[in-house]
Image (tube, rainbow, N blue to C red):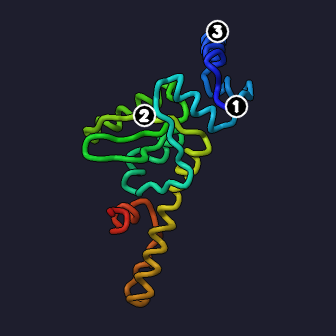
Amino acid sequence: KALTDAQVQEVSAEMAEKNIDALSLLKEKALVREEEIAKAIATMYKLPYVDLFGQIVGAQILKTIPEESARTYQMVCFKRDASMMDVAIVDPGNLKAIDAAEFIARKYSLKVRYHVVSSSGLTYVLKQYGNMVERVQEVLRDVEKEEGPEAGVLDEEVTDETIRNAPVSKM
């Protein structure tokens, strides 16, 4: 169930009184399920909610925000075009996360459009960072099957540098 207007006001007041973030307070009070908490936070911050369960994010888009930053600040880039990056963030009140996203956006000359995501939805996408190594290894195995072991594609250890130079990561 979604929060009533009265509950939103109560939570907002208690956040200020206790100097606690919305996510922690809503979880502590167990007023709603996790996805509903994310929707409530989105409403409180006047941001759109995004459900990332089942969404596969392309490697180039995902790499817009480095994995370490994504995990530290609990945010991911899930959509990007020539002028805009869409960032899903668990806690839009985390000013360090916002600063990090804005810094990254400036690096690519992009604007940022923020969306609120649940912790579980974010975790679903964060797991895709690790899958990049697995995807590259799978492609390299396929190439070796087609071209034979003399191709030597699996001779080197798959590292971040290998991934950056792999044709599949540039798609």
* Residue that numbered label 1 is attached to: 32
* Number of callouts: 3
**What is the three-letter code of the residue carrying label 1?**
Val
Q: CA distance from mark 2 to mark 1?
A: 22 Å
Choose the circle earlier in sequence order: 2 or 1. 1
- On residue 139, the disc is none
Kindly identify the residue that appears in the image at 64 percent across and 21 percent down: 4
Q: Position of residue 106 (x, y in %)?
A: 29, 35
Q: Position of residue 151 (x, y in %)?
A: 37, 85
Choose the circle earlier in sequence order: 3 or 2. 3
Labels 3, 1: front one: 1
Of 77 and 130, nearer the camera is 77
Q: Position of residue 25 (x, y in %)?
A: 67, 23
Which picture quadrant has residue 16? top right
**What is the three-letter code of the residue carrying label 3?**
Glu
Dot 1 alpha-carbon crowd within 10 angstroms: few under 14, some 14 to 19, many 20 or more? some
Kindly identify the residue that appears in the image at 57 percent across and 45 percent down: 121
Which picture quadrant has residue 100? top left
Kindly identify the residue that appears in the image at 48 percent across and 64 percent down: 133
Q: CA distance from mark 3 to mark 2?
A: 26 Å
Q: Position of 28 compared to 143: left or right?
A: right
Kindly identify the residue that appears in the image at 50 percent across and 41 percent down: 50
- On residue 17, the disc is 3
Q: With respect to residue 34, does 13 lie above or below?
A: above
Quadrant of the drawing holding the C terminus: bottom left
* Residue that numbered label 2 is attached to: 114
Q: Position of residue 32 (x, y in %)?
A: 70, 31
Local secondary structure at mark 3 = helix
